[in-house]
């Protein structure tokens, strides 16, 4: 991979981040009417509104306002929440680890199950396992995640009562000392087995919901890639030279079939970022999704835009990383894009 | 038909499901057993039986009838999104590809930028800013879907521009508008239609999800995501309330997903003809 390709990618990254801030700026400063009036409240006097407008710089030209907005963002200043009165960046930092833990757990489950099923479906193409895997994949991409969340809640909390249905932690427990912000890892580091069990039990339903919603995409791409790879000459050669079927599939073929998966996982991250909002509300998961949804109904625009900027940044960074990784994994495409 | 079924089951099953769903949605006013908004306070939260196939809601309205009416709203919203996005995207993409040069470069960078955003998160923010309503949710989702059509239309327009019949019409003095509307756009509609079928399922899901969190259709309106949301409070007792409208969403989206996959395979047989080696 040439340095020029990396530079081009990073330039693209800067462009996209720039674009996100233009969009969030337009949404928060231009669309919702008069922010000064909103902040001052419906009964404020004209002078009070005018004072707030001057204080916020809303009487300046739009370009100047955007420049200030961008400069503030670059300094990590996402504004102040209208509801809590606290800096948005501080609030978001506190709730994002819970959301990331959920997304990472869901991705891990989806990848393990999806790769296994996708591979088996390709190897036994047309057989029962292929049909089952393809059916699961179709259902997975067609099912509303918010509905699946309710059904899992009904089954495993309501009917069977095997798992807790809300929050990150039982009332009997205190959160583990914060190291990573991921309760699973922090509980492990604290060496508290009872706490770890409780954390995992709370994580199970929301993470499984998101995993089921994601696994379809994984199965589809792994199956398609695996079918392509199994057609290659070097696979035929490996089999003809007497290697065991299992060795060929898992050591030779899978390694190459996994390359396209990397790209799909990058794209799935967008669905997961939104999915977490929906799933967090059902399971009362105290993450960024619950936080931003509360903000939406309070018309707390600094919070909504802060979340959008951070989520977009996370998404764009993941995909740039994926793209660079892709070029390392598959040197053939390195110079094309 | 039987031959098509063994060769491309996705297309047949998907087509049948979509046909059924469309039929039910169109005929809802005639086949729904009850009006969707008749309140019956003595028949609240009834379980499913022979009269009320999916039970009744918290003020005694028949949930099955509301699902049929909700299906109309959800389908119409999904259709609106892909139609608005495909018309805008086709025009932008074919114009950009056909004109080329700086215009093309700028337009396509812009499209790539929109595609690099986490679409649903941005749609959520946009809808919140515009004000929570079904119209605004549809608008936000449609705008964010434009690049997918623009990209396909541009690629096709680039290929078409080199074809003799297009060059002939240019030599004969056809203006840009005529070339686009007579030569280019009609010839890329097939490709755009495939993208529409592939995307409409996702569009229906997205509208339902936005409605579920309160940003899309607003309660007096009957929409499937709203139905699941109002049933949420009763999930542990009257579980059928949320279960049934959710199933309706799933069947609808499954139909469109299978149909889209089937169409793509049908139009690009290479993708499906490879057999397992070894």
Image (cartoon, rainbow, N blue to C red):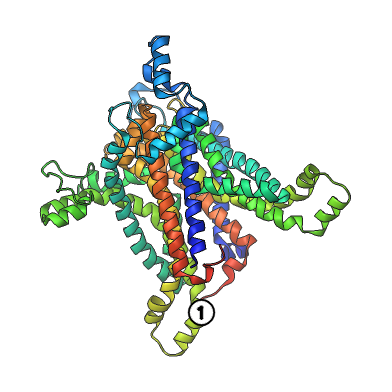
Mark 1, secondary structure of its residue = loop
Q: Residues within 10 Å of mark 1 (few under 14, many from 20)?
A: some
Q: Is residue A167 left or right of residue B273?
A: left
Snapshot quadrant of residue A85: top left
Residue in the foreground of this view, choosing between B2 and A272: A272
The residue positioned farthest toward the right in the image shown: B172
Q: Is residue B198 visible?
A: yes
Snapshot quadrant of residue A50: top left
User: x, y percentage for residue A225?
Assistant: 48, 68
The residue positioned farthest toward the bottom in the image shown: A241
Q: Eyeballing the image, is B222 above or below A99?
A: above
Q: Eyeballing the image, is B34 above or below A208?
A: above
Residue in the foreground of this view, choosing between A132 and A142: A142
Question: Where is mark 1, residue-wise?
Answer: B277
Residue drawn at the location 31% of the way across and 52% of the way down: A208
User: x, y percentage for residue A80?
Assistant: 32, 30
Q: Is residue B117 visible?
A: no
Residue drawn at the location 35% of the way across and 34% of the way down: A293
Residue drawn at the location 38% of the way across and 76% of the way down: A250
Q: Is residue B206 left or right of residue A170?
A: right
Image label count:
1
User: x, y percentage for residue A96?
Assistant: 30, 44
Q: Eyeballing the image, is B87 above or below A243?
A: above
User: x, y percentage for residue A180?
Assistant: 22, 51
Chain hosting mark 1? B
Q: Quadrant of the C terminus of chain A?
A: bottom right
Residue in the foreground of this view, choosing between A12 and B117: A12
């Amino acid at each position: 991979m040439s340095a020029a390709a990396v530079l081009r990618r990073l330039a693209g990254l800067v462009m996209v981040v720039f674009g996100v801030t233009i969009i969030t700026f337009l949404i928060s400063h231009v669309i919702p009417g008069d922010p000064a009036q909103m902040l001052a409240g419906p009964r404020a006097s004209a002078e009070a509104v005018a004072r707030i407008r001057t204080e916020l710089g809303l009487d300046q030209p739009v370009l100047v306002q955007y420049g200030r907005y961008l400069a503030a963002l670059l300094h990590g200043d996402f504004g102040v929440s209208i509801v809590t009165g606290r800096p948005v960046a501080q609030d978001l930092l506190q709730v994002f680890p819970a959301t990331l833990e959920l997304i990472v757990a869901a991705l891990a489950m989806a990848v393990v199950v999806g790769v296994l099923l996708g591979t088996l479906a390709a190897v036994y193409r047309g057989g029962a396992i292929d049909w089952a895997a393809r059916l699961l994949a179709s259902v997975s991409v067609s099912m509303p995640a918010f509905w699946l969340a309710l059904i899992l809640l009904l089954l495993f909390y309501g009917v069977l009562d095997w798992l807790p249905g809300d929050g990150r932690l039982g009332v009997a427990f205190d959160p583990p000392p914060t190291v990573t912000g991921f309760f699973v890892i922090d509980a492990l580091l604290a060496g508290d087995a009872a706490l770890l069990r409780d954390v995992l039990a709370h994580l199970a339903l929301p993470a499984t919901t998101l995993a089921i919603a994601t696994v379809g995409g994984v199965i589809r791409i792994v199956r398609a890639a695996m079918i392509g790879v199994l057609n290659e000459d070097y696979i035929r050669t490996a089999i003809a030279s007497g290697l065991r079927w299992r060795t060929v599939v898992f050591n030779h073929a899978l390694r190459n079939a996994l390359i396209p998966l990397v790209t799909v996982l990058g794209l799935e991250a967008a669905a997961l970022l939104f999915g977490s909002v929906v799933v967090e509300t059902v399971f009362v998961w105290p993450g960024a999704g619950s936080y931003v949804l509360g903000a939406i109904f309070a018309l707390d625009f600094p919070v909504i835009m802060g979340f959008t900027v951070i989520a977009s940044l996370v998404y764009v960074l993941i995909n740039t990383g994926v793209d660079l990784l892709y070029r390392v994994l598959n040197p053939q495409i390195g110079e094309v894009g | 038909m039987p031959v098509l079924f063994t060769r491309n089951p996705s297309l047949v099953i998907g087509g049948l499901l979509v046909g059924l769903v469309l039929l039910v949605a169109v005929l809802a006013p005639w086949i729904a057993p009850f009006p969707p908004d008749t309140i019956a306070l003595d028949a609240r939260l009834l379980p499913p039986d022979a009269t009320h196939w999916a039970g009744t809601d918290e003020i005694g309205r028949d949930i099955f009838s509301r699902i049929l009416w909700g299906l109309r709203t959800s389908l119409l919203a999904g259709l609106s999104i892909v139609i608005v996005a495909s018309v805008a995207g086709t025009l932008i993409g074919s114009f950009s590809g056909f004109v080329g040069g700086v215009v093309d470069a700028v337009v396509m960078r812009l499209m790539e930028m929109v595609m690099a955003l986490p679409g649903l998160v941005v749609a959520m923010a946009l809808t919140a800013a515009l004000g929570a309503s079904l119209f605004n949710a549809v608008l936000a989702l449609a705008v964010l879907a434009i690049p997918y059509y623009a990209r396909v239309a541009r690629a096709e327009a680039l290929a078409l521009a080199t074809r003799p019949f297009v060059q002939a019409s240019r030599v004969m003095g056809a203006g840009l508008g005529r070339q686009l509307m007579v030569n280019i756009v009609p010839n890329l509609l097939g490709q755009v239609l495939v993208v529409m079928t592939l995307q409409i399922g996702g569009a229906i899901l997205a509208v339902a999800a936005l409605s579920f969190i309160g940003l899309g259709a607003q309660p007096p309106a009957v929409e499937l995501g709203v139905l699941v949301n109002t049933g949420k409070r009763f999930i542990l007792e009257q579980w059928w309330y949320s279960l049934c409208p959710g199933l309706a969403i799933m069947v609808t989206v499954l139909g469109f997903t299978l149909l889209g996959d089937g169409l793509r395979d049908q139009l690009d047989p290479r993708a499906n003809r490879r057999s397992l080696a070894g």
